[in-house]
Image (cartoon, rainbow, N blue to C red):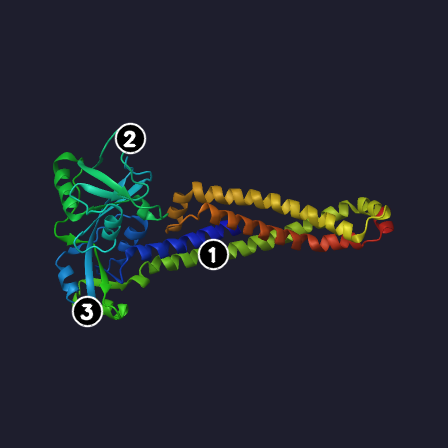
Amino acid sequence: MVLTTVIISRGGQDSLRLARERLGADVVVVPRGSVTGVEGALLLGNATNTYMPRGVVDRITAVPGVAQASSQLYLTSMANSSCCSVSTMFMFAFDPVTDFTVEPWLQEKLGHDLQVGQAVGGADVFVPEGQDKIKLYGYDFDLVGNLERTGTNLDQTLFMTFPSAYAMQEISKTKAKMALPLLTDTVSSVLVKVDQGADRTQVAQAITDAVPEVQAVPAAEMFGSYGDQISGVLRTLVVIVVLTVALSLALMAVIFLMSVHDRRRQIGVLRALGATQRFVMLAYMTEASVLAVAGGLAGAVLAVVVVYFFHDLLVSALGFTILLPSVLSMIVLVVVGLLVALVVAAAAAIVPALRASREEPAVSMRE
């Protein structure tokens, strides 16, 4: 329980931190009243119908304190796509002329911009076996690169330029079972870089005042609802863990007391043969340690299996992404979990062990 709680709480907080860092912006501008929908799209890859006229980009750029503004368009998520190793693939388009989040990576890794018909995928996006292109809504994409694994919805995202998105929409009208619901000259969000030294909160408020149909949120406050949700889940898990540890401690103490009672004659014989109080004490504490390590390992394995193999179910149930720890981090967490198990077992066994070691041999053997 302790290990699972730590993995979930740390994973949720790390995913939020990475999501904010991935934005690469100081302020995020979305259609008024759609902050939650955009948060769900960026963090979980949820489909969202949030659109605003593309003309707002120029109006936002004209606001004092805005250094750079770049628009993005969130497309319908693809369910059970053959080119993604997860159940849902998120797609969004960006403006290569003004973009400052994906474009720098393209220049560093590829050395060139994305052309029409080219796309970059997350770690879980790939070209289906036996094909040389990714077909989406009847349109063929060349997958020219993949981002490094992050453990967030970025791993299942396909990035394309606006011209590619428009071309895909046009093809979908005749070659897809269902046309792509894409509105020309619309955007879903605008990422903003503020001038050096400018206050992000003040710039966000200025944007909201200048463009009433939008809502500007400082990047540090983005995903606030999910942060509150993680905190609520964490508080619940902490209460469960405290109760679990307390009940385990009481139950183990009772079991060790029963064990001492059943072995009183054996302890008396050992003491009569010369065993010291320290020997009896160490024997019980050693037994407690062996049981703690065995039980702790079983619990650690169960925690790892649940978190790794049921990751998607946990994300769906909890409502936020969980960034899985690296192998090294997991080993460290397992070791810490075993130490917790040892401490709890030792605390449960200490009183019965002291009682057994201090009892007179004659009294123990007589009973």
Residue most toward the top?
130
Q: Residues within 10 Å of mark 3 (few under 14, many from 20)?
A: some
| Whether residue 32 is situated above or below residue 158 in the rendered picture | below
**Residue type at mark 3?**
Asp
* Count of labels in the image: 3
Question: Is 72 left, or right, of 231 in this rendering?
Answer: left
Q: Nearer the viewer, mark 1 or mark 3?
A: 3
Observer-nearest residue: 82 or 146? Answer: 146
Residue 183 can be seen, yes or no: yes
Identify which residue is drawn at 44% across, 43% down.
308
Question: Is 145 left, or right, of 267 in this rendering?
Answer: left
Residue 15: image location, x then y, percent = 37, 53
Q: What number is the disc on residue 236?
A: 1
Observer-nearest residue: 210 or 261? Answer: 210
Q: Nearer the viewer, mark 1 or mark 2?
A: 2
Identify which residue is drawn at 38% across, 60% down.
228
Q: What number is the disc on residue 18?
A: none
**Residue type at mark 1?**
Thr
Tag 3 residue: 209
Q: Earlier in the sequence, mark 1 or mark 3?
A: 3
Residue 205: image location, x then y, percent = 23, 69
Task: Give the distance between the C-alpha atoms of the residues marked 1 and 2, in whole angstroms.
Answer: 44 Å
| Whether residue 132 is situated above or below residue 188 in the rendered picture | above
Tag 2 residue: 129
Q: Secondary structure at mark 3?
A: helix
Question: Is 320 left, or right, of 332 in this rendering?
Answer: left
Observer-nearest residue: 96 or 263? Answer: 96
Residue 367 can be seen, yes or no: no
Task: Give the distance between the C-alpha atoms of the residues marked 2 and 3, in whole angstroms.
Answer: 51 Å
Q: Earlier in the sequence, mark 1 or mark 2?
A: 2
